[in-house]
């Protein structure tokens, strides 16, 4: 289902005690929202590619993904975390995603591929705090580097769905999608929503071969969640 009820709009407990609020609660639905976060910004050009830099290539890639996502999933809201030349401060994208309460955050990164067949990597944030004993009290506060624990299982499920599709035999001739990694991937730090890093090795033919595989890998994610 493309629409999901935002639990934070009105407390369900309050709604159940008032029929009018319950009606309002069930009618206020918002679209599934994806935030695309292209690596680099106005202060950081990123890695050197074959004929340009990561900053410009990832933004163009995000814009094309946004365009295709709106075609294939017209009721999905797609946001790009930055514009051309925009300078971002530390954790600014994370703060933006948390403020909008997005359903899925995708960081997009490129590097210059030297292998014959390019590679694609999927990252999920995880650090040593995952193994710590958390205080389970309702009013316990979590620092930003532990934000990932709130949707850890959900993120793991989503990345599994994407990986299953990207490892399909139809794509093996074009690129290799490796097993997803759980690492303290800095661009995903501080994000509460399910957040996934996609790092792609670019050849001279650019990012075009990755557009439709990624678009199709999100189908099950969008409809299931």
Image (cartoon, helix red, strand yellow):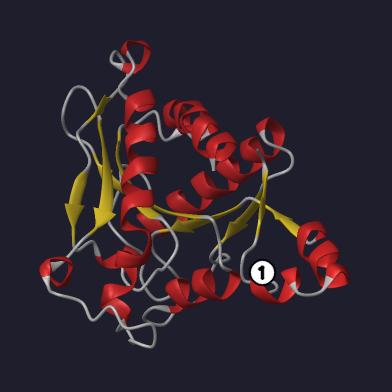
Residue 212 in picture, x, y percent from top left = 51, 27
Q: From the viewer's perspective, is residue 22 above or below residue 183?
A: below
Residue 18 in picture, x, y percent from top left = 81, 74
Q: Quadrant of the C terminus?
A: top right
The front one of 53 and 73 is: 73
The front one of 215 and 55 is: 215
The residue singled out by tag 1 in the image is 12
Residue 89 in picture, x, y percent from top left = 41, 82
Q: Residue at x 54, y 66 (%)?
A: 82
Q: Quadrant of the N terminus?
A: top right
Residue located farthest toward the right when viewing the structure as drawn: 20
Q: From the viewer's perspective, is residue 120 above or below residue 80?
A: above
* Circle 1: element type: helix
Q: Dot 1, crowdedness within 10 Å: few (<14), some or many (≥20)?
A: some
Q: Residue at x 32, y 66 (%)?
A: 148
The front one of 138 and 75 is: 138
Q: Is residue 128 left or right of residue 156?
A: left
Residue 197 seen in the figure: no
Q: From the viewer's perspective, is residue 99 above or below residue 163?
A: below
């Amino acid at each position: 289902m493309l629409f999901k009820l935002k639990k934070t709009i009105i407390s369900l407990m309050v709604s159940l005690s008032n029929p009018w609020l319950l009606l309002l609660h069930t009618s206020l639905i918002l679209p599934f929202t994806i935030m695309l976060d292209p690596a680099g910004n106005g202060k950081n050009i990123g890695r050197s590619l074959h004929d340009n830099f990561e900053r410009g290539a990832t933004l163009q890639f995000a814009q094309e993904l946004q365009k295709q996502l709106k075609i294939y999933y017209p009721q999905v809201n797609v946001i790009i975390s930055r514009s051309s030349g925009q300078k971002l401060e530390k954790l600014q994208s994370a703060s933006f995603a948390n403020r909008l309460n997005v359903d899925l955050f995708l960081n997009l990164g490129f590097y210059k591929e030297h292998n014959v067949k390019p590679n694609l990597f999927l990252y999920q944030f995880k650090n040593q705090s995952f193994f710590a004993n958390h205080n389970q009290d309702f009013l316990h506060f979590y620092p930003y580097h532990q934000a990932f624990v709130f949707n850890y299982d959900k993120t793991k499920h989503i990345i599994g769905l994407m990986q299953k599709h990207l490892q399909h035999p139809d794509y093996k001739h074009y690129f290799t999608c490796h097993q997803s990694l759980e690492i303290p991937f800095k661009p995903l730090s501080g994000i509460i929503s399910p957040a996934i890093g996609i790092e792609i090795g670019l050849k001279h033919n650019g990012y075009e071969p990755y557009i439709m595989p990624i678009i199709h890998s999100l189908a099950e994610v969008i409809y299931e969640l």
